[in-house]
Each structure stands twice: as C-alpha cells, then as structure tokens.
Image: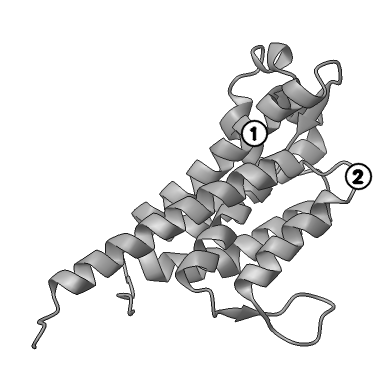
Amino acid sequence: MSYQSYREGGVNPIFVIIGVNLLLFIATIISRNIIIELGLWSPYEVFLKYPWGIVTSMFLHDGFFHIFANMFTLYFFGSYLYRLLGSKKFLITYFGGGILGSIFFVLLGTLLNPDSLALAVGASGAVFALGGALSIIRPDLRVFIFPIPVPLPIWVAVIGGFFLLSLLPFVAWQAHLGGLIFGLITGYLFKQSQLNRWRERTNYYF
C-alpha cells in the first residue's frame, strides 16, 4: 500500500514544538518553580489543583539528556510520520498521545499509589504515540538504536524501548503506555482509512 507524500506550505509543526520545548527548558533552568507549577501531578486530588499539567507537562523536561532524547526522537519519528500523513493527523497523534499518556499517569498513579505524591514532565508519551503509529503504518521500517549495531524493525525498537525504560527508576511508564496505546490505535485507523481510499480508486477486473 502506498501513501501520498505530504508537502505542505507554512511552518513545520515539528520545529514549532521543538522550539517551544527548548524555550521552556531554558526557562526551567532559570526558575525551577515552572516545573512545579506546570508539571503533571498525581494522585488525582493533587492533579485537580494543577489540571493544566495534562498538557503543559508535555513541554517540560528535567535535564539535558531527557530533552535531547525526546526531541531527537520527535524529529526523526515525527518527520517521517508528518510526510506520510500531513500536519493534521500528525498533530492528532502527537497531542492525543501526550494527553492520554498524562491521563494514564494520573489514573494509574491514583489507583496503584494513592498515597504517593508524584510529579511528571516530558514529551515521552507523545513521542511513544508517534512510534506506535509508525509501527502500524510502516512495520518494516528499520531504525538504529544505540548501542545495537544493526537496524531493527521499528515495532521491535518501540515495544522493546517501552519495556526497557519501564524497568528504570523514576520513569513515568504509565505515560509511555498511554501514548503508545493511542499511537497504535490512530496508526491502525489511519492505515485503514488509506486502504479504503485505495480500494475506492482501484478498478477490479474478473
């Protein structure tokens, strides 16, 4: 199945998202209170005091490696998905995955650790949504993952990366899970939509 390559005029949304993340990262270096005010809190009772964190936390990062890893992955996964689907579907995948990741973080944090105060920041849920969508749309796409010297199918890299990161302490695996699920679902829906349009344009002969 082939996909139209979208070449839209105007500003590339990926560069805008990266730019906002970098500006806010610099701002958090100047004032750490920004993370407290705009981050995502769990459990639910604390989240209600900072509900905007469900979106604003996606633009905050704690540490250079954190923002570098997310923005690097956003650029490469996002650029590929953007060319396949266009800006509208890209933005739906990115922000939908980030928001569902935030919801998963709050809900699962409330259910599993109701007495534990937790604060999450980062675009990882949104980035995992991009990886999940690409895993469905382009399952044979191969990517390099450091330090593995050979390219891996993207679905192996994304699923494997999810499980490996989930083993690390202080990683918001709940947000990763929510973003990944959203990406897998949207990837399937977009792929089916493209397949249906392809069928409508095809003449069958018997």
36 with respect to 202 (left or right): right
Q: Position of residue 83 (x, y in %)?
A: 40, 70
- On the image, which quarter does residue 135 sit in? bottom right
- On the image, which quarter does residue 7 sit in? bottom left
68 with respect to 50 (left or right): right
Q: Position of residue 187 (x, y in %)?
A: 45, 59
Considering only vertical position in the picture, is 43 above or below 67?
A: above
- Other residues around mark 1 within 10 Å, as few (<14) / some (14–19) / many (≥20): many
* Along the line of sight, the residue nearer the viewer: 167 or 53: 167
Where is mark 1, residue-wise? 104
Q: Position of residue 45 (x, y in %)?
A: 71, 11
Residue lying at the far right of the rendered structure: 169
User: Which residue occupies 22% across, 73% down?
Assistant: 198
Considering only vertical position in the picture, is 55 above or below 85?
A: above
Q: Secondary structure at mark 1?
A: helix
- Other residues around mark 2 within 10 Å, as few (<14) / some (14–19) / many (≥20): few
User: Which residue occupies 89% across, 50% down?
Assistant: 168
* Along the line of sight, the residue nearer the viewer: 72 or 108: 108
121 with respect to 185 (left or right): right
Where is mark 2, residue-wise? 169
User: Which residue occupies 60% across, 19% down?
Assistant: 51
On the rendered image, what quadrant is the N terminus found in?
bottom left
Q: Secondary structure at mark 2?
A: loop
Task: Say if mark 1 contacts mark 2, CB within 8 Å.
Answer: no
On the rendered image, what quadrant is the C terminus found in?
bottom left
Q: Amino acid at mark 1?
A: Phe
Q: Amino acid at mark 2?
A: Pro
